[in-house]
Amino acid sequence: MKRSRISRVMQILTILQVGKSYTVSDLSKIFGTSRRTIFRDLKELQTIGVPYRYDVRAGGYTIEPEFFLPPVDLSPQEAMSLLLLAHKARDQIQLPFKNSALLAALKIENNLPVKIRQYCNDTLRNISIKTTPRAKIDLLDNIFAPLLVAVLRRLIVNIHYYSSCQRKSIVTDLSPYHLRYNDHKWYVLGKSSLHGQVRTFKLNRIKKLSILDKYYIEDKNFDISEYLGRAWSMIPEGRLYNIKLKFLPEVAHDVVEVQWHSTQNVTFEQDGSAIIEFRVDGLNEITWWILSYGDQVKVLAPRILRQRIVETAQKIIRTNQQESTI
């Protein structure tokens, strides 16, 4: 919902929760908008789970006051930070149960003192957040919800999964240990019966999931931080490499502004370039990150990584040259 509609929906909540019944015509006059718009706003309330009801005797709509939270004691900055996350930043992370998150924010917002609520409204009108591309999961809630149940209850799940490495769908029983959001995508980590070890699966590639009536024994030795170790992102490969890269002056300052890895070490050269060193488990994930900087980065070490970058770049050239001749 846009902020203007969110504000109006929140105001409708405030009006309806006092226990008095209001008709659509009443609400239309109060907000100076059409009946059609009010019906659409009421539909939004229904979508996010607000239990408003139509009182036949009174001929209008109302919400039970007990549905909302008691008054909350928040400072203006605390309230603004929460609402900033709910209204502006919630599209940055592909949150499961988005309607529940929005409803929680509306409950908090609805019970703020008038001055703090006005401060939040004025502040949020002047803040915007550009969303970044993220993996699309049409049925995120349908996958996330049973996985969460399985993690908490230690239940085995059966998944049909598209493996990009094998370029085909695979089926495996999975003992899910942990859910993780990383680099705009959701993952589940757990022991796969097909692979006989802990593996990482992207939620957007799970095509079918069912919870089995089987429990798994908790692996108390599994630790998410220890498992990921020094992997560049999500997939450790079992071998550490000392990576040394030189970023040219045009991009050097932009690159070093970000802490890309826990082992990152930066040295600036006199010409404005930057030497960045990492100690990373595996080369596959960091290869694609390096390629994203094109001709603005040089691989100084190790040689095997430099060769991999060169070979991949040559494949890109050949592919595009072939396309240009078609």
Image (tube, helix red, strand yellow):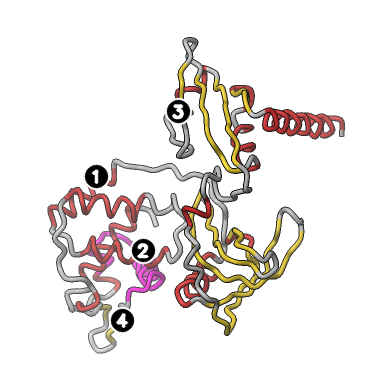
Residue on which disc 2 sits? 101
Q: Residue at image x 15%, y 52%?
A: 75
User: Disc 4 or 2, which lies upstream in sequence?
Assistant: 4
Tell me residue 292's x, y (percent).
61, 33
Residue on which disc 4 sits? 53
Which image quarter is the N terminus in?
bottom left
Q: Amino acid at mark 2?
A: Ala
Tell me residue 63's x, y (percent).
25, 77
Of circles 4 and 2, the one toward us is 2
Q: Quadrant of residue 123?
A: top left
Of circles 1 and 2, the one toward us is 2
Q: Is residue 47 magenta?
A: yes
User: Disc 3 or 4, which lies upstream in sequence?
Assistant: 4
Structural crowding at the residue carrying mark 1, measured as other residues with C-alpha within 10 Å and reported as few (<14), some (14–19) or many (≥20): few
User: Disc 1 or 2, which lies upstream in sequence?
Assistant: 2
Mark on residue 256? 3
Q: Is residue 171 above or below residue 21?
A: above
Q: Amino acid at mark 1?
A: Thr
State the SS at label 2.
Answer: helix
Q: Residue at image x 53%, y 55%?
A: 227
Q: Nearer the viewer, residue 75 or 18?
A: 75
State the SS at label 3.
Answer: helix
The reply to whether callout 4 and callout 2 are in contact (CB within 8 Å) is no
Q: Main secondary structure of the magenta part?
A: helix
Q: Quadrant of residue 11?
A: bottom left
CA distance for labels 1 and 4: 33 Å
Instruction: Tell which residue pokes out farthest to the top in this image.
Output: 270
CA distance for labels 4 and 2: 22 Å
Residue on which disc 1 sits? 123
User: Disc 1 or 4, which lies upstream in sequence?
Assistant: 4
